């Protein structure tokens, strides 16, 4: 409902103006004030959308009243009503933000036209505010999904550089390019409730404002933390961990949770390396330590010499996992135990090296969408025979998890994912929503989509939206703003930016060329 306040020191003028407005706009609520001071007093209770203000009034004139009211309510609209058509009054009124005026006497049609025009502007502004508020509420609900998408793709290097800045921009001021970043990796026991844990950690990080939470899978939860300048990395990371350890759902105190911390990186481009370090630190510390820094592994002498697997060997091992060749994968890993024993390596170093190899397999399985627990040795190994037995047991457990997952997967899963994205491209689709639809993990969907289609799911979704927009642009009755909303963009400016990146021309330029060719 719209409200109008009529301010005039002449009672007959107020009544006449009320009758004219009521006849043209019967749904409008009208109040009156006999001078500027009375108007200032009634505005906080009535909260009018439009004020028709006479200029020459006793006690407080119209310009003084407008100045007082506009200072408190800058969005309130005014129409100046005066018998003095002078430059000085006009200059002062314009300075105060008055956009319209009526000269006494005015025709009924002139009054209704002017008031109608301003009320229409008020309605448009109100609708725009409501739309923006609805969009903000909607964004607030999808932000955790966007955040999890970003973390997942950064840690597994599946994000397209064209869209990284745009996706991060959706999160507001959470990240600045000059901040160092690191990964904190949480591994919880199988009996933990993942939904409750995720919600609790997400709430805590939102309160702290210094990190993003990734998707939870297999009892594992990665977090990207941001570091403040001029402060110690270790002190900041430890402070974040202490806050997280206070969350009851983590069960840190009873030893059912381990936390690993990777080394800081100067940009998000290399954050995946901190993730690998955090994962290794979590395995090295479990189950004895509540949390452990990756740097402490090296200082403890647990990482002497070269890596267990070079990049080529690691790539071959991951390919064997992808193809389900578990006998070959085990045959590539287990002989290292005999080699370490023959070389006289200390058993605790050999244990750590084999744990690194198991971690490579675990990471590969997570990327393939396999729900499996983080591998670690349940006790300090004292003999090489124990190391071999426990390693074989951990490999067998992961193999069973992988084969169970493989039996559930259908060969046309990516085709179904494509169909789902095409059919729902106008909605706020997230990686977790797609994964839930397909019955697989976000990690697997992100990896396999890029491998089989050649682009990430975000790029595919963007292409779908842009192609749909191109089709709609042939309908001249639709505005570009309407088209942006229809294809799935809540911000027309962002739509224009994406459209130009994808098609090479702005929506306006494309439509002009399209309609000109017909």
Image (cartoon, rainbow, N blue to C red):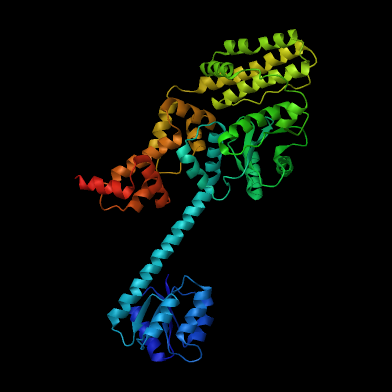
**Is residue 46 at all visible to an observer of this figure?**
no
Which residue sits at x=60%, y=40%?
213
Determine if residue 305 is in view: yes
Question: Where residue 410 sits in the image (x, y, percent)?
Answer: 46, 23
- Is residue 233 found left or right of 83 in the rendered image? right
* Image coordinates for residue 510, horizontal then vertical, percent: 29, 46
- Spot occupied by residue 452 in the image (x, y as percentages of width and height): 43, 25
- Please identify the quadrant where the N terminus is shown: bottom left
Q: Residue 376 versus residue 227: which sits nearer the camera?
A: 227
Left or right of 148 in this view: 252:
right
Q: Quadrant of the C terminus?
A: top left
| Horizontal arrangement in the rendering, residue 248 relative to residue 20 (left or right) | right
421, 99: nearer the viewer: 99
Residue 13 picture location, percent across and down: 38, 89
At a point 36% along the width and 44% down the height, the residue shown is 500
- Which residue is found at the position 51% from the left and 34% from the top? 436
Residue 295 falls in image quadrant:
top right
Residue farthest to the right?
Answer: 382
Q: Quadrant of residue 337?
A: top right
- Residue 184 position (above or below residue 401): below
Q: Nearer the viewer, residue 246 or 318?
A: 318
Q: How many marks?
A: 0
């Amino acid at each position: 409902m719209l409200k109008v306040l009529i301010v005039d020191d002449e009672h007959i003028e107020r009544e006449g103006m009320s009758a004219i407005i009521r006849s043209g706009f019967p749904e409008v609520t009208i109040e009156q004030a006999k001078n500027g001071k009375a108007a200032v007093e009634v505005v906080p209770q009535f909260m009018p959308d439009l004020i028709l203000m006479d200029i020459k009034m006793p006690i407080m004139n119209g310009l003084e009243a407008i100045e007082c009211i506009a200072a408190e309510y800058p969005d309130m609209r005014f129409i100046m009503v005066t018998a003095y058509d002078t430059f000085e009054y006009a200059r002062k009124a314009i300075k105060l933000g008055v956009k319209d005026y009526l000269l006494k006497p005015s025709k009924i049609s002139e009054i209704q036209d002017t008031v109608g025009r301003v009320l229409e502007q008020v309605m448009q502004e109100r609708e725009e505010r409501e739309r923006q508020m609805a969009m903000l509420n909607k964004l607030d609900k999808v932000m955790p999904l966007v955040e999890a998408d970003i973390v997942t793709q950064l840690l597994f290097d599946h994000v397209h550089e064209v869209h990284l800045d745009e996706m991060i921009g959706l999160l507001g001021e959470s990240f600045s390019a000059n901040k160092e970043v690191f990964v904190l990796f949480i591994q919880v026991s199988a009996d933990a409730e993942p939904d409750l844990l995720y919600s609790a950690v997400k709430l805590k990080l939102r309160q702290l404002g210094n990190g993003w939470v990734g998707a939870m899978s297999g009892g594992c939860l990665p977090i990207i933390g941001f570091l403040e300048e001029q402060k110690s990395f270790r002190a900041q990371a430890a402070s974040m961990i202490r806050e997280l350890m206070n969350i009851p759902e983590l069960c840190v105190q009873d030893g059912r949770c381990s936390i690993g911390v990777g080394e800081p990186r100067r940009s998000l481009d290399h954050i995946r390396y901190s993730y690998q370090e955090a994962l290794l630190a979590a395995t090295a510390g479990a189950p004895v330590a509540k949390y452990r820094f990756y740097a402490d592994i090296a200082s403890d002498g647990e990482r002497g010499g070269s890596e267990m697997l070079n990049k080529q060997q690691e790539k071959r091992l991951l390919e064997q996992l992808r193809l389900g060749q578990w006998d070959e994968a085990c045959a590539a890993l287990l002989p290292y135990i005999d080699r370490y024993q023959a070389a006289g390596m200390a058993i605790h170093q050999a244990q750590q090296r084999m744990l690194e190899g198991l971690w490579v397999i675990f990471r590969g399985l997570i990327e393939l969408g396999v729900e499996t627990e983080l591998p670690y040795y349940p006790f300090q190994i004292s003999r090489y025979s124990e190391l071999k037995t426990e390693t074989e047991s951990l490999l067998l457990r992961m193999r069973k998890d992988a084969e169970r997952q493989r039996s559930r997967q259908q060969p046309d899963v990516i085709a179904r994912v494509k169909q789902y994205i095409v059919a729902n491209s106008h909605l706020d689709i997230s990686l977790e929503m797609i994964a839930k639809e397909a019955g697989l993990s976000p990690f697997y969907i992100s990896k396999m989509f890029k491998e089989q289609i050649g682009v990430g799911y975000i790029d595919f979704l963007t292409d779908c939206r842009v192609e749909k927009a191109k089709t709609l642009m042939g309908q001249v009755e639709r505005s570009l703003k309407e088209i942006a909303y229809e294809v799935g963009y809540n911000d027309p400016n962002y739509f224009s930016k994406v459209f130009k990146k994808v098609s090479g021309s702005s929506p306006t330029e494309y439509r002009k060329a399209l309609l000109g060719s017909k």
